[in-house]
Image (cartoon, grey):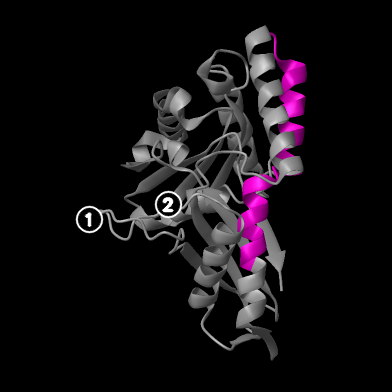
Amino acid sequence: MREVTYEQIVDAVKQLCIEANVDLGLDVVRAMQEARKREKSPVADEVLSQLLQNAEIAASERVPMCQDTGMAVFLVELGQDCHIVGGSLYDAINEGVRRGYGDGYLRASIVHDPIQRKNTGDNTPGIVHVELAAGDTCTIHMTAKGFGSENMSRLKMMKPSDGIEGVKAFVLETVRLAGPNACPPVVVGVGLGGNFEMSAYLAKRALFRPIGERNQREDAAQLELALLEQINQLGLGPQGMGGRTTALDVHVELYATHIAGLPVAVNINCHASRHKHVTL
């Protein structure tokens, strides 16, 4: 049994919160650089150039790349032989969020409940998903999820008879309806299968995967590529100003489902696609 302390988690989460907001991932940078090579629209090329410049300024000045510093969402892969000591995992993560958003001068965007809507003042609580894994390590994946894109996400309980073509149509409709509101070029997470809540979780989980990393199943990988091509034919383009680059990537996650169901959820990331991880 290996021990990971409360303070180790707090410190790690603090850094993840800051880095996710000020350092655009290399996978995103490379994807936008490649998109510029394919673009035929001068306006789209200029928008992509400005987004990359914005990322450079954020990294060099250590300031957020976007004023919406997001809701802190975590996927924790907790080894079954890893023992957390000195406090609870959830408390440690929220303390890390509190310190990260405070010390990093990041905007506090969380209200304590959806009715009275009083700001908590420190961007807590975060949302934490825990998956038990083999081994004795604790891997923490973090995304700062802005709500311009989050608000454009959708879920539908489809019928098996709708088939993959029905799934494709729903994903395309979701991206089209999102338009410029999701700050394209977007990354699209698709959760297919499970039940109502599982499909939504799968869609969110898909967004933690680096851009360009395909699903290990060949049919799912081909679905990702087909959706990416069709989305980029919509012509929305960067920031909705037209062009070939509406999406940087599409990630699909699958799970077993009921014989009578075909749940599909679509979760969208904006062009920043902020995701970081650490293994303790």
**CB contact under 8 Å: marks 1 and 2:** no
Secondary structure, mark 1, is loop
**Residue at position x 52%, y 29% in the image:** 183
On residue 157, which mark appears?
Answer: none
Read off the residue under disc 1: 116
Q: Residues within 10 Å of mark 2 (few under 14, many from 20)?
A: many
Q: Quadrant of the C terminus?
A: bottom right
* Residue in front for this viewpoint, 238 or 118: 118
Distance, label 1 to label 2, CA atoms, is 29 Å
**Residue at position x 48%, y 65% in the image:** 128
**Residue 48 belongs to magenta span:** no
Badge 1 or badge 2: first in the primary sequence: 1
Q: Amino acid at mark 1?
A: Gln
Read off the residue under disc 2: 199
Overall secondary structure of the magenta stretch? helix
Where is residue 46 drawn, in percent x and y?
68, 15
**Residue at position x 56%, y 49% in the image:** 206
Q: Nearer the viewer, mark 1 or mark 2?
A: 1
Seen in the image, is 179 located left or right of residue 13?
left
**Residue at position x 61%, y 46% in the image:** 274
Q: Can you see residue 47?
A: yes
Q: Quadrant of residue 112?
A: bottom left
Q: Can you see residue 41?
A: no
Secondary structure, mark 2, is helix
Where is residue 221 drawn, in percent x and y?
64, 40
Q: Residues within 10 Å of mark 1 (few under 14, many from 20)?
A: few
Q: Quadrant of residue 113?
A: bottom left
Seen in the image, is 70 located left or right of residue 45?
left
- The residue stretch that appears in magenta: 13-41
269 w.r.t. 203: above or below = above
Where is residue 64 drawn, in percent x and y?
61, 43
Seen in the image, is 99 located left or right of residue 15?
left
